[in-house]
Each structure stands twice: as structure tokens, then as C-alpha cells.
Amino acid sequence: MKLKRELTTLTRNETENVLMWLNNELPRKSYSQVGRRRIVELLDATKRLLDLTNRAGRRGHGITRWSKELIRCTTWVNQRIRQYPASPIVMWSPKGSLTFGEDFSVRPRIEDEAATAHCILGLAEANVLARVRQCACRRWFFARSKNQRSCSATCRHRLYEQTDAFKTKRREYMRRYARLKRSGKVK
Ligand SMILES: [Zn+2]
């Protein structure tokens, strides 16, 4: 029970780290254009890897079909994560408790990028990476449900306004309104 709770806390921290990085909320020195591209590529490839794995086998029966794409994707993710070598480290938190983290053997400039890359794999392992999504407004968010596509109610409505269902409804409304106007029932 305790382990599960700790894992949940870990996942929450990892989600927060990834979202902060993706949404440019860290100090400016944490970012470079290539670094940003590398992280988004890793995120996409890891999501793809999970997706391919799910489709390659039946749950509990192992992978039954190794496609070339699945192998290519696995190799790609492994090569990319190897660019962020890390070793475990123990340290003290400001509150005085012993914490366990990772020490990255990378240039200081890409330490935040490396931490984000490791968090992405952590979220994949916890099977929640597919919930890390980008809204139409460009903001990254964690989807609380499978179907959530927007970061906020405002964005959800904006997205709905672009759908055919909304356009049809709106057209019908305008037509009805025009008819009422002609009949003199509304001004
Ligand atoms: Zn949004």
C-alpha cells in the first residue's frame, strides 16, 4: 500500500517536471531550440513505442508480432536516452529528509533536459504518458480522463466551435433567427 502511494507521488512529480519543462516555466537557460526538439521527439517516440507494444501483443500473452517499426522505435528511444546518462544519488531535502535522485553526467546546460527525458520514461513506465498532451492553444497538460483534449473549459469550447456539429447548429440557429426577424417577432 505504501509503495503504491509513493509511486503515485513520484508520478505526480514527474508529470509536474515534464509539464513545467514543456510549458517554458523553467529559467530560460533550461532551453535551447535543439533541446526542445529532442524532448518533443522523445515524447512522441515513447508514446509511439507504447502504442506499438499494445498493438503487437495481447495483454498477458507477450508480444506475438515484432514489426520492423517496433524494433526501430525501441532502438531509437534507447539511443536517445543514452545521451542522458545518470547515476543514483542520495541527498538531503531542505526539510532534512533523505531523498533519492539522479545525478546526470551531462553538461550543466542540458541537466534540466536530461531530467525531463528521464521523467518521460518514468511516466511511460507508470503507463500514464499518453495523458501528457498538447492543447490546440499549444499548452501542455495532463488529461484527467481518456477523452480530454483541451487544457481548459475555454479551450474545450473553442475546439467545439470548430466542429461540424457546432457549425450546423449555429447555421440552423441563424436561419431560425432570420425567419423570426422577417416575421417581425424579434427586432
Ligand atoms: Zn488550451
Image (cartoon, grey):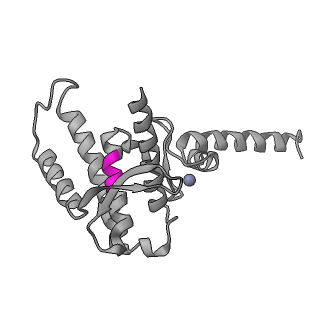
The answer to which quarter of the image holds residue 60 is top left
Position of residue 187 measured from the top left corner of the image (x, y, whole percent): 89, 47
- Please say whether residue 40 is visible from this viewpoint: no
Residue positioned 58% across, 44% down in the render: 160
Position of residue 4 measured from the top left corner of the image (x, y, whole percent): 40, 31
Residue 47 higher or lower than 92, as above or below: above
Task: Spot the residue most to the front.
Answer: 96
- Which quarter of the rendered picture does the N terminus lie within? top left
Position of residue 87 measured from the top left corner of the image (x, y, whole percent): 25, 57
Closest to the observer, 147 or 11: 11
**In the displayed structure image, the side of residue 26 where residue 115 appears, left or right:** left
Closest to the observer, 36 or 85: 85
Position of residue 174 measured from the top left corner of the image (x, y, whole percent): 71, 44
- Please say whether residue 77 is visible from this viewpoint: yes
Residue 81 higher or lower than 107, as above or below: above
**In the displayed structure image, the side of residue 16 where residue 110 appears, left or right:** left
Q: How many labels does the image show?
A: 0
Which region shows up in magenta?
118-122
The main secondary structure of the magenta stretch is helix
Residue positioned 17% across, 49% down in the render: 74
Residue 93 higher or lower than 187, as above or below: below
In the image, residue 42 lies in the stretch drawn in magenta: no
In the image, residue 120 lies in the stretch drawn in magenta: yes
Residue positioned 30% across, 65% down in the render: 38
Residue positioned 44% across, 55% down in the render: 92
Closest to the observer, 22 or 11: 11
**In the displayed structure image, the side of residue 112 where residue 168 appears, left or right:** right
